[in-house]
């Protein structure tokens, strides 16, 4: 876990301990009035916590998002009774990524229920923000260019108000779906969560999954009554199969889906000592080959199967030179704090220093966030506004890919095929969702209980673009 994530967690827990201490004092003082008040008040406080205060939000919702966005053009936008009017010199041809910088302020209902901005007059959309939001946010208007240019696009705040000062950011891009795309997935399902629509539409795609994902196997232990080692090996085999088989749903040939078989949550230890053999935490294995048995392509490291950082980097180098991708898709190291995701990014960077082939573009994604584990907020099928970010010194260039309703359904089915997203939610989460459904008006999709079905099946897939500079020429 990154130092920043530790700091955010520490601050969040400290604030929560103070609130719990105050609540405990209130419960104890209520006992002086009537014996039955403390248990009743305790239950009501717990219900209120689960319904309204259980989100993991590690920043104040009144904070401005702070981006250094590398936009091609910026235009002032007038808002007249909610109708957006852009200047006559603003050209929206070529399907660019469109972002609208807005100032939001939640009403009193927006502190109890999720505030949202409704987008009307074009393709109907809704983009949801933090309860109590007050500050700069970025709406995603990608695919709304025609309605915006025609003066039909209207914004309406739901439980929040929009300030009249708006700015349109136009970000133009090359066609990243032309040529070969290679998606680097730290775990099975990361490629689908982040970029199913992208790799399904690319001219040619490769999916490279780094780890077998064998840990956290309680479901297999409890359901099939296995010991930890047997459950870890079975889960690793199942997720290895998923990583190779599910991309075929999007038309990716089996020969272009590769499972490298390294061990979950061990990439950081491998990186710390690149020559060391780092075994699985739970599967009692120090050999990657059992989890590579579904691969149709062979790699030089199949000869020894050693789980080392050196082998991982060589595998990536070999696959990049073989596939010759124009675009590499991989995790974003600043936005996504998961240790395996950060290490996956670092391994690709190191591999590119020794490859004969260099991609033109990196597309970076975030399946987990430092600051807000509900992002994208709102319901499945909604648009994806920009995530919370507070580091203006980091230049960011977003690319939003529109995902059609049909493609969203295909993505939902692909996620449903992933065994790790299939187990039912634990009882505590079911109770919390029940309370949030009836008290906080939240909804979850019918096609899966896992939170990723809500977060990933959306109108947009969001990436951050980086043009590759061949660092070998600088050495």
Image (cartoon, grey):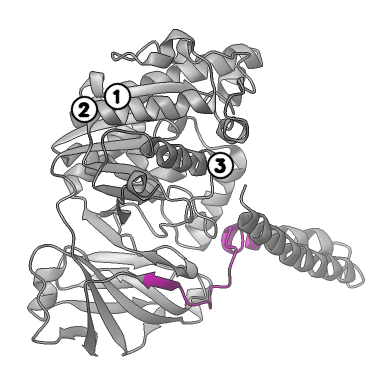
In the rendered structure, the answer to whether residue 48 lies left or right of residue 441 reads right
Residue 408: image quadrant is top left
In the rendered structure, the answer to whether residue 368 lies left or right of residue 293 reads right
Q: Residues within 10 Å of mark 2 (few under 14, many from 20)?
A: many
Task: Please name the residue that numbered disc 1 is placed on.
Answer: 257
- 358, 342: nearer the viewer: 358
Alpha carbon of mark 1 to alpha carbon of mark 3: how far? 23 Å
Do labels 1 and 2 touch, CB within 8 Å?
A: yes
Task: Please name the residue that numbered disc 3 is placed on.
Answer: 339
Query: What range is drawn magenta here?
Result: 47-68
Does residue 257 lie above or below 42 as drawn? above
Task: Please name the residue that numbered disc 2 is placed on.
Answer: 252
- Return the disc, 1 or 2, that comes first in the chain's sequence: 2
Q: Secondary structure at mark 2?
A: loop
- 379, 133: nearer the viewer: 133
Does residue 334 lie above or below 255 as drawn? below
- Return the disc, 1 or 3, that comes first in the chain's sequence: 1
Residue 419 seen from this side: no
Q: Secondary structure at mark 3?
A: helix
- 449, 290: nearer the viewer: 290
């Amino acid at each position: 876990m990154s130092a920043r994530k530790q700091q955010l967690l520490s601050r969040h827990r400290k604030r929560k301990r103070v609130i719990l201490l105050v609540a405990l004092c209130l419960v104890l003082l209520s006992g002086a009035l009537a014996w039955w008040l403390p248990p009743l008040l305790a239950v009501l406080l717990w219900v209120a916590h689960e319904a309204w205060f259980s989100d993991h939000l590690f920043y104040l919702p009144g904070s401005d998002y702070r981006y250094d966005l590398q936009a091609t053009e910026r235009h002032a936008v007038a808002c007249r009774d909610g109708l957006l009017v852009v200047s006559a010199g603003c050209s929206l041809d070529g399907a660019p990524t469109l972002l609208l910088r807005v100032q939001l302020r939640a009403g009193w209902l927006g502190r109890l229920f999720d505030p949202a901005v409704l987008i009307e007059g074009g393709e109907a959309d809704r983009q949801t923000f933090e309860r109590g939001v007050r500050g700069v946010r970025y709406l995603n208007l990608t695919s709304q260019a025609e309605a915006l240019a025609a003066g039909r696009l209207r914004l309406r705040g739901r439980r929040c108000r929009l300030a009249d000062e708006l700015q349109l950011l136009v970000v133009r891009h090359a066609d990243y779906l032309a040529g070969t795309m290679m998606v680097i997935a730290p775990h099975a399902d990361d490629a689908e969560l982040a970029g199913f629509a992208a790799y399904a539409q690319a001219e040619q795609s490769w999916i490279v999954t780094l780890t077998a994902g064998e840990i956290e196997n309680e479901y297999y232990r409890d359901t099939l009554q296995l010991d930890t080692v047997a459950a870890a090996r079975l889960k690793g085999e199942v997720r290895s199969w998923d990583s190779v088989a599910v991309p075929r749903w999007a038309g990716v040939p089996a020969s272009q889906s590769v499972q490298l078989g390294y061990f979950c949550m061990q990439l950081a230890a491998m990186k710390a000592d690149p020559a060391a053999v780092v075994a699985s935490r739970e599967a009692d294995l120090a050999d990657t080959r059992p989890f590579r048995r579904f691969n149709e392509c062979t790699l030089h490291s199949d000869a020894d199967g050693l789980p080392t950082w050196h082998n991982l980097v060589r595998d990536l180098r070999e696959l990049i030179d073989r596939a010759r991708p124009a675009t590499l898709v991989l995790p974003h190291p600043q936005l996504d704090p998961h240790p395996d995701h950060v290490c996956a990014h670092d391994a690709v960077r190191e591999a590119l220093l020794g490859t004969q082939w260099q991609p033109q573009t990196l597309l970076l994604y975030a399946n987990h966030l430092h600051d807000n584990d509900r992002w994208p907020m709102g319901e499945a099928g909604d648009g994806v506004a920009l995530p919370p970010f507070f580091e203006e010194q980091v230049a960011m260039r977003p690319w939003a890919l529109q995902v059609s309703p049909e493609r969203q359904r295909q993505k939902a089915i692909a996620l449903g095929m992933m065994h790790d997203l299939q187990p039912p939610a634990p009882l505590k989460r079911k109770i919390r969702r029940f309370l949030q459904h009836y008290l906080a008006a939240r909804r979850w999709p019918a096609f899966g209980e896992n939170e990723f079905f809500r977060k990933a099946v959306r109108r947009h897939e969001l990436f951050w673009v980086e043009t590759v500079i061949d660092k070998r020429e600088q050495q």
